[in-house]
Image (cartoon, helix red, strand yellow):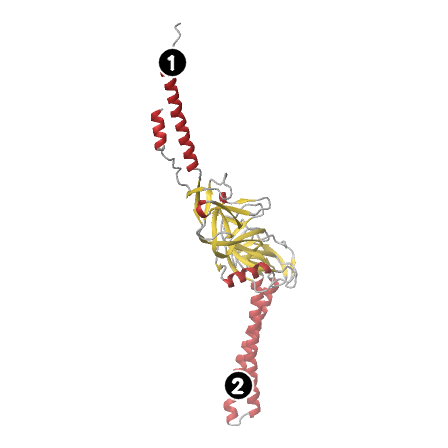
Amino acid sequence: MRTRTIGELTPIISLALILAACGSGGTDASSKKRASNGAVQVGYIVARTASVPIPAELPGRTVAFQSSEVRPQVSGVIQRRFFTEGSIVKQGQPLYQIDPSLYRAATNQASANLASAEATAAAAKIKADRYRPLAEIEAVSKQDYTDALAAQRQAQASILQNKAQLDTARTNLRFTTVPAPITGRIGRSLFTVGALVTTSQTDPLATIQQLDPIYVDIQQSSAALLQLRRSLASGGAVPTRAAVRLKLEDGGEYDLAGSVEFSEVVVDPSTGTVTLRARFPNPTGLLLPGMFVRAIFAQAIDPTAILVPQAAVARDPKGNATVWVVGPNNRATQKSIVADRTQGSFWVVTRGLAPGDRVITQGTGKLQANMAINPVPADSPQRIAPPSQQQSQGKKAG
């Protein structure tokens, strides 16, 4: 192999030095770009006030819309029962048959007494009419005519008395058939066929409850109600009539929404609570009286709240909430906020932010206080700057 001389190697060494110089120039250009573009690009949203419901989750119990105890209005032995326990009964539907024998006899007796009184009244009237012309010619004494006239009036009064007794007897006979006072679902029968019932007994024959719709009695502390009223009075909240949702005992939610009907005007001294009654549709009968539920609804609306995406809010070990905002001169600034509840995928911020603040929602992972940032609206596409003129020249020279 032939060994190259220094003269032959000189062009090669010069070319290598030129290439090295070109590479060094490109590196310096990249460093200058990183220095000039050192700001971290972040996405932000502009804080704006919104009308946000003020939710309340309160305990409650279901109550039948209507409830009626079926009681006998006459005494006697139950002969028949006309309903199936647990079924739906209609208002006026016969439920029990009490032995009507004594009441039918009393009705017949009252009817006979009325007929007798009517016959007596007819005879008294004929006698009084006959005595009237005779008394005028003094064929009979005026006293005899007066007595005949009084007897006629007494007979008429006796008719009225016997009619009233007949009405009472017929009413008692009608009461031997015990009807349903309301439409609803009837429970178990507490008396069987053959049992003796009386008008003064303590136990009802059965209980009927109307379950569609159904009430939910909600308990709210008087302190919370007082705070709400003060907020409404000061203008910090406005009243609303929002739908009420129910959370059932098993943790699931009831499908249908209800509405608040009214609020009690007194505070229960034993519990310190006020009762609010809500009404719910219950077509399938899922809600039964006495069930424990939790009612979720909004009693007012906060018109000055600010909604911030949950991803933008961080919390320290003590639970204090903070967010990053775009500060002066495009510097990252951290703010402490008050965010006690959520609304969908947002935190409801009640203090710490002002309308117009630019809240950073993207690129918060590497932020530090007073760091230079390049803010763009959230979800904007990432823009990559084109190569600088120096880099282009370096690449061409290389």
The N terminus - image quarter: top left
Image spot of residue 197 (x, y percent): 64, 60
Q: Quadrant of residue 388?
A: top left
Q: Which element is circle 1 on?
A: helix
> Could one spot residue 276 in this view of the protein?
yes
Image spot of residue 266 (x, y percent): 59, 64
The C terminus - image quarter: top left
Q: Residues within 10 Å of mark 2 (few under 14, many from 20)?
A: many
Q: Which element is circle 2 on?
A: helix
Residue in front for this viewpoint, 250 or 237: 237
Query: Marks 1 and 2: which is nearer the front?
Result: 1
Q: Which residue is mark 2?
A: 128
First in residue order: circle 1 vs circle 2: 1
Left or right side of 238 for 199: right
Residue in front for this viewpoint, 211 or 75: 211
Residue in front for this viewpoint, 229 or 48: 48
The image's mark for residue 9 is 1
Residue in front for this viewpoint, 177 or 393: 393
Looking at the image, residue 143 lies above or below residue 155: below
Left or right side of 387 for 283: right
Q: Which amino acid, mark 2?
A: Ala
